[in-house]
Image (tube, rainbow, N blue to C red):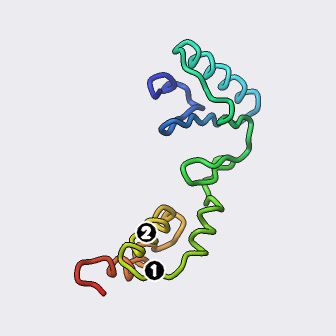
């Protein structure tokens, strides 16, 4: 897939998702036209039920993306807010994984998470 769209400035992909991001509606239509042409030439298809076109905001790989700004996906924020206090090392690791995904949005995340990380070390209680 990457070879198919690598030279398209306004098109990116992550695993099986293709993201078209443009400055203007006209540019968006041009980029979509070129993308669909290339998919057709390669005998590939896009599943209509998975397509979102012309949206100002999308959810992709756990983030809300809107007009070039990456934010938190509301569903995952609710999971963090509603999380119960971890009681086992496995639960602590799961909570660190959940919050760590958004470490870019949490100032000094490593320092704040250090006490939890310490609980996962061998011999910690």
Residue 96 location, quadrant: bottom left
Judging from the image, what secondary structure is the residue with disc 1 in? loop
**Which residue sits at x=52%, y=70%?**
106
Residue at horizontal 74 percent and vertical 34 percent from the top: 24
Q: Dot 1, how many residues are within 10 Å of its Cα: few (below 14), some (14-19), or many (20+)?
A: few
As measured in the structure, the alpha-carbon distance from the residue carrying label 1 to the one carrying label 2 is 9 Å
Mark 1 and mark 2 residues within 8 Å of each other at the beta carbon: yes
Task: Give the residue at the far left of this rendering.
Answer: 123
Q: Position of residue 85 (x, y in %)?
A: 50, 82
**Residue at 59% from the left image edge and 63% from the top image edge:** 76
Q: Position of residue 26 (x, y in %)?
A: 76, 27
Q: Of marks 1 and 2, which one's residue comes earlier in the chain?
A: 1
Q: Is residue 95 above or below residue 2?
A: below
Above/below status of 6 relative to 62: above
Residue 105, how many percent across, how many down?
54, 65
Instruction: Quadrant for the C terminus, please.
Output: bottom left
Which type of secondary structure does the marked residue at label 2 adopt?
helix
Left or right position of 8 against 91: right
Q: Indicate left or right for 8 with 33 as reference.
A: left
Q: Nearer the viewer, residue 64 or 92?
A: 92
**Rendered image quadrant of residue 124:** bottom left
For residue 86, the mark is: 1
Circle 2 is placed at which residue position? 94
Direction top: furthest residue: 41
Which residue is found at the position 32% from the left and 77% from the top? 120
Quadrant assignment, res 62: bottom right
């Amino acid at each position: 897939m990457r070879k198919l769209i690598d030279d398209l400035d306004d098109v990116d992909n992550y695993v099986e998702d293709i993201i078209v991001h443009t400055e203007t509606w006209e540019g968006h239509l041009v980029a979509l036209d070129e993308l669909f042409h290339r998919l057709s030439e390669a005998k590939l298809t896009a599943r209509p039920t998975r397509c979102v076109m012309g949206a100002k905001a999308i959810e992709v790989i756990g983030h809300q993306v809107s007009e070039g700004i990456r934010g938190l996906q509301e569903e995952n924020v609710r999971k963090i807010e509603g999380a119960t206090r971890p009681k086992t090392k496995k639960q602590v690791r799961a909570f660190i994984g959940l919050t760590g995904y958004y470490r870019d949005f949490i100032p000094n995340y490593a320092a704040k998470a250090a006490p939890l990380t310490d609980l996962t070390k061998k011999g910690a209680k």
